[in-house]
Image (tube, coloured by chain):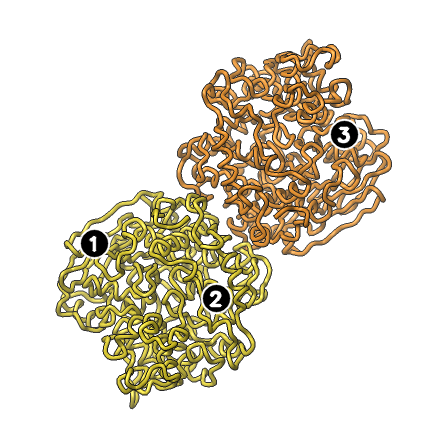
Chain colours: A orange, B yellow
């Protein structure tokens, strides 16, 4: 029994409608914590190597963390994961909203789902109970329709849900799972995994509040953040504008991606950023439970062309950029509609936008023709084409069927040189931060187990000069400011430790937007559990999670060759701030070798050494099929 | 400027009587902290490779830590070090008493001494000032005589001193530096380094109290320890009896060394332990500044054979054992006298006792004869012979001249198979804890840069079952109890992290007897400096210090071959608890390779990899002469 936790893991096998709970001992929780740690544990422990990600054998894990469900700012997210149909390796994402909070309060530290129902179902989890219920009538519906239908059926209000729309049902490898309609467990195709199980929705309600070992200290911490967050410029900015507040600045320094990473700057950036949204369609800001930062935009609009409902939230920076500068679109209303369409259908906005931009570039270059697109003039800058493509992808119609599995697979099918235009690592499209500018982030894009995800890397520009970023870096033992494009060993060490710190936070689970220091996050866990937990343990937990994910990928057949950025990043952009700035391939190769070495992995193959596995207590996780 | 520090380092060049102060920036202190960190920095930065340890070029460093000089229990020690005349590598020791506390209050974070005076001198350091004063009349005096003479000369009382007696003057490689008469910077021959510089004493007085960044938190921590220490069994035991309270138990499990590590048990153990001392000659317990634990025994006695003055303190466990069971002596008065003689003459009790026991075994085996010993019947159990030998060693007379440089060098000179009886690593005799029982400690004895010192290792028996020891291990990421004789990778990881934790504490500088957790030590530093310092940084600091010491040894010519336990430990003892228990040489070799690997050193040569050096920010410290 660990104080502050539910001490129960809910297991569901949809193939035989079996439901049971599992109790793990205290050292299990100290070793794996929750979130990404528990996800990796179950994938390695119970998933047979090399099963098809869309087969019933795949395991889908919803894992809040120890602190989830408590009244702590930044503690309401959860980790969702499975074997990824997009990368073939691990899919691991964090999502905000109320779902994780509610799942923990329903009495569970995690929900682990295997098998496949013989007809569409949904799960109804409430206060320690679970029911598998028929969802045949819900199949084909959007996430909003599902929410309304289930609330009506159960006679409940304010249900917290994790749902797929048509894209998930249609097994699009770029589909996601939507929590509470407007938050996404976005990357790696988890919507398709849920769809492959005939699972439309998990609805949750709970009211058991976890009690910390040191309630006073815990409450003091929450109160401290709620009264101090406005002192942190980053939190104040999230509070005022949400993400995307500094797109103009990002454009000026070369961070903003333009035209499938082929452009250098976007002159209309001020028309599509969070400030423009505030001045136009933004009607509210909303929050996850217990968080005063309230970073989540809510938009509502109706004009001649588009209508967007406020129930679907609003676009984050990634979405503004990918449906904006990334495809040369400056129509903010269209971008908001794209965001809504992705949400309703359960599509990852980054991979969907990334794949559409890829298709647009193919079209511009004559690799795709109107014949391929079903007559759509698929050019950069065409908002209608973009919106049409989203619908086609969600329903796997026409060109949408080819694009629904992401740009890598689409390029393989299209051929004719399309591969060079597919901008992804391990099949997963990039976050909207240019690795030519932030080269340490570029390293993480390369080596992170879940592909070109920006969430387990940090932004080199924050650590290039003195300031709060450097203070955080110092706490990780990295003392001197380093240029954003530096790839020295000292830089690799820094981004590695930041990567581990993020992997720890994803096990806790805490939000990267609440400006908790590493130390404070550890203090939270200490006050919650009563453990004498240290920052050292935290980083080791991050190392364990990153290494488990690496082991998972290796056994699924990925190799060091998959830790590779697309060619384009090794050339400068034609204009803008990065004109003349590219990644030196030799420097990046050296940095990768250094990263492997510092992780205790083989410097060439990136396979964790036996010593490292035993040090982390995860030698059990390695099957014999992985080369030493 | 770092809050809580003196922000000044005092430099003295005795060759030209030059005195100056040095100011380092904040990142210097964050990177090296103090104590062992500052010691390693100056040795690597300023000492030319391969100079004779007894030449004027050697650098002698007295370094308190950041927390030294404050009213914090367990924060009054200091680190003293130089190139060791005993090992040829680094000598690094911590000593208690008031000297470090006073040096910091005199306005200095460290005192770095180079050169050689052309006649005997002492330093008088007081409130930011320093004088080099004549000590010709003090040469040849004992540490007590020196104290009295200097106090008289300066008209001061309660001077805090670091002094050598005759053994240091006579350049005995097993001589030490005595602080405040009764505490020793014992290991590695630092007394000889001081003697080689014609430096008899450093006398200090200061009254500037360092002010913490968060005085209230700092005061609260001190108050907490002062009111709670008796709740910790280990601290309560130190309070009641000091070290050596559990020698009977140690004998029962095989920890107590007997007859130069050749015996298995000592039947008279209850006659020589701390309880026996309490019942006989102990007249008081004393403390370092600000510490309520008061672990330091004070003895006073006069019987037909011996007289011991209370000014010389009393024997610690190591001294009780090495002059007791280790040479088969059960006469507690004689042991107390041996302790006093070592103190007065500035001899390391462990290496002195170890070398005498070695000589006794040589004598028993016929390798040494009466002719060699000048007629002394040098047999195990003979207290008079033991006391006579201490005097001969201190004055380098007769057989004492051969033994004054420790058992390794003595064995080389004696030949005739004596080498096999020389029980040391890197020339430094063992702490009194049997590595056949505590095999993780055995690994640290092997690989620690300063030889078979027990202070940077921990006791495997504390972590073989649940309890406070395991809680500490968990904070270092090591979750399961492991047998004392285990040498698995998990065990190596644990002892490595404990080693790093100790190296951090030796930079802070904190006492291992005050039951501060790692977390609390970091909290102290945070409250003192205002840094957002983490446990992660702390362990990295430990890693930096251990690796810098490794680099120092490598450039001085030591290699992995020097990380070797004597043969004797690979055979069981003839009786006692370890009858039938030995170290498996293959397992120990594997453990060493694993230790190197986990440290980021080459698994065969133990040379730190370039990546590790750059990660730790100490690539500057490596001369070209070290093989890659």
Chain of the residue where label 3 is placed in the rendered structure? A
What kind of element bears circle 3? loop
Q: Quarter of the image holding residue B113?
A: bottom left
- Relative image position of residue A253 (x, y in whole percent): 46, 22
Q: Residue at x 51, y 81 (%)?
A: B574
In the image: residue B472, left or right of residue B186 = right
Chain ID at mark 1 = B
Which is more toward the observer, B305 or B48? B48
Q: Are marks 2 and 3 on the same chain?
A: no
Q: Residue at x 56, y 17 (%)?
A: A276
In the depicted view, which residue is nearer to us: A313 or A273? A273
Q: Residue at the spot x=52%, y=79% of the render?
A: B252
Q: Which mark is residue A171?
A: 3
**The disc numbered 2 marks a residue on which chain?**
B
Q: Are marks 1 and 3 on the same chain?
A: no
For disc 2, the neighbor class at 10 Å (few under 14, some 14 to 19, many from 20) is: many
Q: x%, y% of residue B244?
A: 43, 75
Query: Would you place residue A272 above or below residue B170 in this image?
Result: above
The local secondary structure at tag 1 comes to strand
Q: Which mark is residue B12?
A: 1
Image quarter in which the N terminus of chain B is found: top left
Q: Give the residue at mark 2.
A: B442
At which x and y percent is residue A357?
63, 19
Of marks 2 and 1, which one's residue comes earlier in the chain? 1
| Number of marks present in the image shown | 3
């Amino acid at each position: 029994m660990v104080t502050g936790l539910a001490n129960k893991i809910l297991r569901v096998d949809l193939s035989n409608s079996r439901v049971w709970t599992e109790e793990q001992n205290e050292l299990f929780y100290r070793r794996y914590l929750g979130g990404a740690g528990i996800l990796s544990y179950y994938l390695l422990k119970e998933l047979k190597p090399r099963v098809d990600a869309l087969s019933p054998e795949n395991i889908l894990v919803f894992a809040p963390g120890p602190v989830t469900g408590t009244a702590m700012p930044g503690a309401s997210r959860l980790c969702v994961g499975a074997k990824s149909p997009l990368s073939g390796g691990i899919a691991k994402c964090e999502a905000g909203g109320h779902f994780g909070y509610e799942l923990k309060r329903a009495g569970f530290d995690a929900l682990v789902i295997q098998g496949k129902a013989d007809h569409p179902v949904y799960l109804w989890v409430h206060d320690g109970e679970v029911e598998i219920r028929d969802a045949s009538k819900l199949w084909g519906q959007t996430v909003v329709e599902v929410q309304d239908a289930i609330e009506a059926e159960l006679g409940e209000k304010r249900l917290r849900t994790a749902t797929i729309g048509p894209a998930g049902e249609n097994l699009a490898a770029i589909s996601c799972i939507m929590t509470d309609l407007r938050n996404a467990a976005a990357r790696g195709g988890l919507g398709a995994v849920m769809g492959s199980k005939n699972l439309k929705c998990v609805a949750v309600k709970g009211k058991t509040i976890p009690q910390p070992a040191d309630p006073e200290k815990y409450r003091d911490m929450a109160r401290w953040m709620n009264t101090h967050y406005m002192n942190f410029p980053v939190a104040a900015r999230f509070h005022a504008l949400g993400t995307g507040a500094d797109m103009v600045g990002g454009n000026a320094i070369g961070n903003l991606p333009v035209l499938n990473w082929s452009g250098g700057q976007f002159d209309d950036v001020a028309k599509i950023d969070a400030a423009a949204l505030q001045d136009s369609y933004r009607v509210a800001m909303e929050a996850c439970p217990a968080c005063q930062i309230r970073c989540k935009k809510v938009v509502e609009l109706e004009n001649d062309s588009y209508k967007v409902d406020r129930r679907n939230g609003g676009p984050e920076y990634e979405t503004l950029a990918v449906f904006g500068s990334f495809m040369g679109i400056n129509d903010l209303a269209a971008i908001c509609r794209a965001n809504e369409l992705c949400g309703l259908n359960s599509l990852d906005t980054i991979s969907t936008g990334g794949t559409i931009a890829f298709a647009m570039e193919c079209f511009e270059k004559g690799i795709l023709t109107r014949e391929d697109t079903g007559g759509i003039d698929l050019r950069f800058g065409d908002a209608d084409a973009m919106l049409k493509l989203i619908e086609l992808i969600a329903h796997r119609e026409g060109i949408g069927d080819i694009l629904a599995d992401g740009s890598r697979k689409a390029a393989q099918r299209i051929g004719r040189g399309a591969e060079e235009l597919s901008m992804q690592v391990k099949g997963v499209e990039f976050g909207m931060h240019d690795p030519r500018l932030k080269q340490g982030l570029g390293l993480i894009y390369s080596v992170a187990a879940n592909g070109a995800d920006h969430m387990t890397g940090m932004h080199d520009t924050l650590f290039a000069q003195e300031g709060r970023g450097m203070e955080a870096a110092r706490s990780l033992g990295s003392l001197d400011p380093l240029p954003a494009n530096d790839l020295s060993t000292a830089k690799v060490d820094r981004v590695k430790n930041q990567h581990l710190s993020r992997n720890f936070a994803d096990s806790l689970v805490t939000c990267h937007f609440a400006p908790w220091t590493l130390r404070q996050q550890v203090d939270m866990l200490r006050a919650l559990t009563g453990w004498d937990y240290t920052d050292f343990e935290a980083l080791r937990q991050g190392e364990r999670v990153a290494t488990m994910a690496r082991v998972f990928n290796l056994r699924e057949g990925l190799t060091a060759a998959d830790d590779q950025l697309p060619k384009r990043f090794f050339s400068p952009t034609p204009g803008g701030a990065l004109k003349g700035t590219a990644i030196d391939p030799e420097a990046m190769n050296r940095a990768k070798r250094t990263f492997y070495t510092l992780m205790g992995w083989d410097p060439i193959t990136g396979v964790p050494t036996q010593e490292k596995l035993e040090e982390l207590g995860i030698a059990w996780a390695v099957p014999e099929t992985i080369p030493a």
